[in-house]
């Protein structure tokens, strides 16, 4: 039985088509893997797309894109990017694919065409009926999950609550055991404040929210959690293999160190969906679109990880 992976092209005015075509040239498709690219042939062919035996192009044939200029987002491009996602959701619901890779879109550009979610993660959770999802970032040396996601820093601080940390931790503990095969995952929890609050000197959230959450998680998950620890030192230890996952309290706390070290090979992975979903860690990069300067490393890693995880999962579900 083949593993079937759908790949959406992302915003036609961004670098999605470029990195996808470049990644496909380097991607070593296994005999049991089948790729379904959802996009527009007129855009993909600008970058040299050539359908191979195990790559099926689902050409959405948006006539309005033929005059599209790279780096200049438009309403037509936004509608097309939204349509690619809707087609991918249809394929998931009908059991046609086992994994999904999404090229970048701009939430700001999508909003005027009716896309009301904070991003891919929230849209897919809604469209696929997933009650809880978490944003995970993966490379060979680091794994990071975010307790709070796309919100202002002020809202993120208020969102660091015991119940939210426990819910995130439980899903990630199960995810590491089920999807990655860790019998006894080691999950290190960041503090929110500098030096993890320094015993209340720099903030009380560690004492009132994070420590109680870690204690509850350890009662439920066989002592898998440690912390809260100062984030700056924790990421250094995580890089050296001291844990299997870092739980960051807010977006930039987790993603600045991850992207600084793993930008060209890191992958965004959504935990909690009924299908494996990955994406590159970069955005649409309108400023370099159409200049053949985009690095395809993250897209290639996203394709490879989706195939690695979706194949075993599909066989296990049979």
Image (cartoon, grey):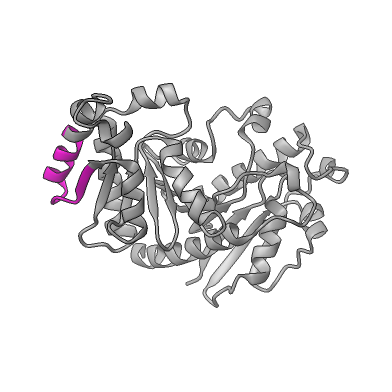
> Which residue is drawn at the image coordinates 36% and 25% (left, top)?
157
Q: Is residue 83 magenta?
A: no
Q: Which residue is nearer to you in this view: 203 or 267?
A: 203
Q: Is residue 201 above or below residue 167?
A: above
Of the 4 image quadrants, the one containing the C terminus is bottom left
Region of the chain picked out in magenta, as a range: 212-227
**How many numbered circles does the render carry?**
0
Q: Quadrant of residue 25?
A: bottom right
> Which residue is drawn at the image coordinates 49% and 55% (left, top)?
261
Residue 294 can be seen in this image: yes
Q: Is residue 162 above or below residue 258?
A: above
- The answer to whether 229 appears left or right of 86 in the picture is left
**x, y (%) of residue 304?**
52, 65
Residue 246 can be seen in this image: no
Q: Quadrant of residue 14?
A: top right
**x, y (%) of residue 187?**
26, 50
> Which residue is drawn at the image coordinates 53% and 31% (left, top)?
118
Q: Which residue is nearer to you in this view: 274 or 161?
A: 161
Q: Is residue 1 above or below residue 14?
A: below
């Amino acid at each position: 039985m083949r593993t079937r992976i759908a790949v959406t092209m992302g915003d036609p005015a961004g670098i999605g088509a470029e990195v996808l075509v470049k990644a496909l040239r380097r991607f070593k498709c296994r005999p049991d893997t089948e790729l379904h690219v959802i996009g527009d042939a007129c855009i993909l062919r600008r970058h040299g797309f050539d359908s191979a035996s195990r790559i099926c192009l689902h050409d959405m044939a948006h006539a309005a894109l033929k005059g599209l200029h790279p780096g200049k987002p438009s309403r037509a491009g936004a509608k097309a990017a939204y349509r690619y996602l809707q087609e991918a959701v249809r394929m998931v619901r009908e059991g046609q694919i086992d994994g999904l890779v999404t090229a970048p879109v701009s939430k700001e550009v999508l909003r005027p065409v009716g896309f009301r979610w904070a991003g891919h993660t929230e849209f897919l959770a809604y469209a696929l009926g997933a009650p809880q999802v978490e944003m995970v970032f993966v490379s060979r040396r680091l794994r990071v999950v975010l307790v709070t996601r796309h919100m202002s820093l002020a809202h993120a601080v208020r969102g660091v609550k015991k119940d939210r940390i426990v819910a995130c931790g439980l899903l990630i503990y199960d995810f590491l055991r089920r999807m990655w095969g860790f019998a006894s995952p080691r999950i290190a929890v960041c503090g929110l404040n500098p030096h993890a609050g320094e015993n209340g000197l720099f903030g009380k959230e560690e004492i009132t929210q994070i420590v109680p959450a870690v204690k509850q998680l350890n009662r439920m998950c066989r002592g898998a959690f440690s912390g809260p620890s100062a984030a700056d030192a924790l990421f250094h230890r995580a890089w050296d293999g001291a844990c299997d996952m870092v739980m960051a309290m807010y977006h930039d706390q987790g993603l600045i160190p991850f992207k600084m070290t793993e930008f060209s090979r890191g992958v965004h992975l959504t935990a909690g969906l009924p299908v494996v979903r990955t994406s590159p860690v970069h955005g649409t990069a309108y400023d370099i679109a159409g200049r053949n300067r985009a690095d395809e490393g993250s897209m290639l890693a996203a394709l490879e990880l989706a195939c690695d995880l979706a194949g075993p999962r599909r066989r296990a579900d049979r």
